[in-house]
Image (spheres, rainbow, N blue to C red):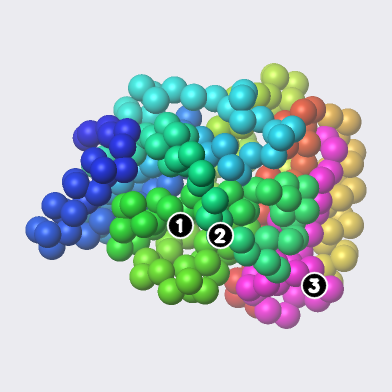
Amino acid sequence: MKLVKTIAEVREITAEWRKQGLTVGFVPTMGYLHEGHASLIEASSANNDKTVVSVFLNPMQFGANEDLASYPRDIERDQKVVEAAGGDLIFNPEPSEMYHEGFSSFVDMTVLTEELCGLSRPVHFRGVCTVVAKLFNIVKPDRAYFGKKDAQQLAVIRHMVDDLNMDIEIIGCPIIREENGLAKSSRNTYLSASEQEAALVLSRSIFMGEKMVNEGERDAEKIIAEMTQMISAEPLAKIDYVKIVDLGTMQQIQRIEKPALCAIAVYIGKTRLIDNFFIENV
Ligand code: AMP
């Protein structure tokens, strides 16, 4: 397993792999890797000859008042996670390697990015789309792996690949959770002991909403109301949103009649956490 810092090195290594007829899987991350990231790397290495993992804390996808400066970093630990999960190459560029002076081209998506996290994080998806498009151009993977944990991001990336005719298969992977239900996230490290306890309200409300759907409830408002009530009862929690949206457009729906997504974002203290469940078999 190798770690490189420059675009030229990634290009050279992956070009050699392609020359040998090897398939390349790609897992983009912001680092501080946990079992959720490891599951993507494992899925990629099971289905591709080689797996590239990018570890890049992309400044462009953070708003001015967000947690770029405090985001946890530990590249040595990350290397161990990638190695154990079967990754072959880590791309860990500096921001200056990705954004040279005078950088001025962006991938800007409408509609899908204007709901859910896009409302409270207005610059986020422009940064995500731009960096993922750049990374796709650098790595040129056959397949790229994204977690369903970031459900809107997965939908946005699928849409970008389709809109811009990128010849890459996008694979969505299941949410990996702690035993207590909390979705694994690098941001969980921000939580104090009492906040960790309070954060369980996210997965509890997700499981309750999912149960309502499985038992036949199709009225989105009823599900949202129950989930909202549960989350609001937790004193340390402050709701950003609890929504049910069309899986294709990310626009809110009243009744669940097509594949949909129930997504929540909740502040636990100062930490903003997200969770969701997919409603695919309607
Ligand atoms: P991040 O480093 O947070 O940008 O995440 C990189 C990738 O890992 C994204 O595709 C995330 O959706 C995915 N990911 C993060 N947490 C989890 C999780 N708990 N389960 C599955 N995938 C995850």
Q: What is the number of the mark on residue 133?
A: 1
Q: Nearer the viewer, residue 274 or 220?
A: 274
Residue range corresponding to the magenta coloring: 237-264
Query: Which comes sooner in the sequence, label 1 or label 3?
Result: 1
In the image, residue 136 sits, relative to residue 246, either above or below, namely: above
> Label 2 neighbourhood size at 10 Å, few (<14), some (14-19), many (20+)?
some
Q: What is the number of the mark on residue 67?
A: none
Instruction: Point out the frontmost of discs 3 and 2.
Output: 2
Q: Give coordinates of residue 59: x percent, y percent.
A: 57, 37
Q: CA distance from mark 3 to mark 2?
A: 27 Å
Q: CA distance from mark 1 to mark 2?
A: 8 Å
Instruction: Point out the frontmost of discs 1 and 3.
Output: 1
Name the residue tied to disc 3. Answer: 253
Query: Identity of the amino acid at label 2?
Result: Val
Name the residue tied to disc 2. Answer: 107
Q: Quadrant of the N terminus?
A: top left
> Label 3 neighbourhood size at 10 Å, few (<14), some (14-19), many (20+)?
some
Q: Quadrant of the C terminus?
A: bottom right
Is 259 magenta? The answer is yes
User: In terms of secondary structure, where does tag 3 sit?
Assistant: loop
Kindly tell me whether residue 151 is visible in this rendering: no
Kindly tell me whether residue 267 is visible in this rendering: yes
View extreme (bottom): residue: 257
Q: Residue at x 32, y 28 (%)?
A: 80
* Labels 3 & 2 near each other (Cβ < 8 A): no
User: In terms of secondary structure, where does tag 2 sit?
Assistant: loop
Query: Identity of the amino acid at label 3?
Result: Ile
* Labels 1 & 2 near each other (Cβ < 8 A): yes
Q: CA distance from mark 1 to mark 3?
A: 30 Å
